Amino acid sequence: MENTNVQSSKKLFSKLGAMYLLGSILIFAVQRGIAALIHLLTPDFAATHSTLYFVLMMMSMYIICMPLMMFFITRIPVPQAPVNKKKMTFGKWLLAFVICYAGMYLSNIIGLLFTSIFGAIIGQPVSNDLLSIATTNNMWANFLIMVILAPIYEELLFRKLLIDRTSQYGEGVSVLFSGLMFGLFHGNVNQFVYAFTIGCVFGYVYVKTRDVKYTIFLHMLVNFFGSILGVFFLKLAGLDQMAAITDPAEMTAVMIENMGGLILFMGYALLLVVMVIVGIILFFVNLKKYSFAKTEDTLPKGQRFKGYVCNPGMALYILFWIVMIILQLFGIA
C-alpha cells in the first residue's frame, strides 16, 4: 500500500498536470479555430500579412488562453505558507544570465544537431519555425511578443505558479518540473532542449529568491539577445539574403555590399562566444555553491517517479506534448 506522501504527491501533481494540459489544449484549440476562421474569410491573409497573422495568433494566447490557464492553476491552493522573498544583487543576477546564456547556446546546438540527424533519416529537413518567424516578422512585433509578453506569462506560469505549488516536495523537484514542463510546452525538439535548460536555471533563481521579477528580466534579456539582437546583426550582415543565393559571383557582390554589417556581425558573434566560455567557467567555479533544499515531504529516490509522474494529469500533459513534438518533427503539426 502506498504511503501518505506518495498518495498526496500523486494527487497534487495530477491536478497540476491536468490544469496545464487543459490550458495547452485551450491554446491549441483557440489558435487553430482562429486560423481556420481567417483562412475561411481571407485565404491569403497568412501569406500576405505574415506579421499581423503572427501577432493575432500570439495575442489570442496571451489575452485569452494564458489568463484562463492561470485561473485554472490558481484553483489549486498553495500547499504551504508563502516563503519570504530574498533580494538578489545585480552581480549575482548578471552571473545567472551569463551561465543561462551559455547553457542555452550549448543546448541549442544539441537540439539543432538532433533535428538535423532526424531530418537526414526521414529524408527532409525539420522546419525551424522560430527562426523563420524571427527573421521574417516585423522586429517591433517580435519585441512585443518575444521580449515582453512571453517572458511575463511564461515566468508566471512555469516558475511562480508551478514552483509555489510543488516546492513542498523539495527545491530540486520544483526546478526539474519547472524546466521539463516549460520545455515540453514549446512543442518541438530544438526548443525543448534549450527551454528545459534555461527553465531549470530560471527555476533555481526563483526557488532561491521567491521573486519572479528576477526570472522575468532574465527571460527578457535572453530572448532579446536571441530573437532581436541576433536577428538585427544577421540582417545587417545580409546573411538572410545570402542563404537564398547559389551563384558565387552574386554571393561575392552581396558580401562586398554588406562588408560593414559582416564585420559587426562577426564582432557580435565573438561576444557571444566569449559569453559562452565565461558562462561555462563560472558554472563550474560556482558548482559547489548550488544546492537544493529538501523538505519532510520529499519522496525517497525510489518513489519519486511514481509520485510525481505516474498520475493521470501529469502523464497526460507529458504525453500530449510528446505527441505534438513528434508531429512537428514529421512536419504535421
Image (cartoon, rainbow, N blue to C red):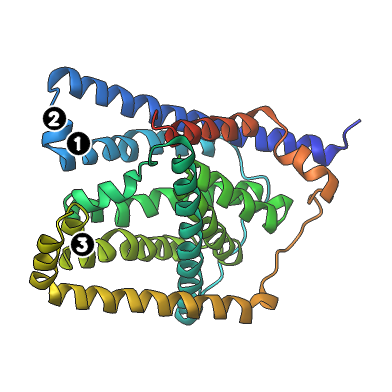
Question: Disc 2 marks which residue?
Answer: 45
**Dot 2 or dot 3, earlier in sequence:** 2
Q: Amino acid at mark 2?
A: Phe
Q: Amino acid at mark 3?
A: Leu
Callout 2–callout 3 Cβ contact below 8 Å: no
Q: Residues within 10 Å of mark 2 (few under 14, many from 20)?
A: some
Q: Residues within 10 Å of mark 1 (few under 14, many from 20)?
A: some
Residue 236 is situated, as x and y percent measured from the top left of the image, at 16, 67
Question: Disc 3 marks which residue?
Answer: 239
Residue 87 is situated, as x and y percent measured from the top left of the image, at 52, 73
- Using residue 9 as the reference point, say whether residue 272 is left or right of it: left
Residue 156 is situated, as x and y percent measured from the top left of the image, at 46, 50
**Dot 3 or dot 1, earlier in sequence:** 1
**Dot 2 or dot 1, earlier in sequence:** 2
Q: Amino acid at mark 1?
A: Tyr
Toward which corner of the image does residue 10 lie, by quadrant? top right
Whether residue 23 is visible to the viewer of this picture, yes or no, is: no
Q: How many marks?
A: 3
Q: Nearer the viewer, residue 125 or 165?
A: 125
Question: Residue 209, relative to residue 21: is it above or below?
Answer: below
Q: Residues within 10 Å of mark 3 (few under 14, many from 20)?
A: some
Question: At 54% across and 30% down in the image, what residue appears?
Answer: 320
Give the numbered dot on residue 53.
1
Q: CA distance from mark 3 to mark 1?
A: 25 Å
Q: Identify the element where label 3 is drawn.
A: helix
Question: At 46% across and 59% down in the image, what residue appears?
Answer: 109
Q: CA distance from mark 2 to mark 3?
A: 27 Å
Q: Identify the element where label 2 is drawn.
A: helix
Callout 2–callout 1 Cβ contact below 8 Å: yes
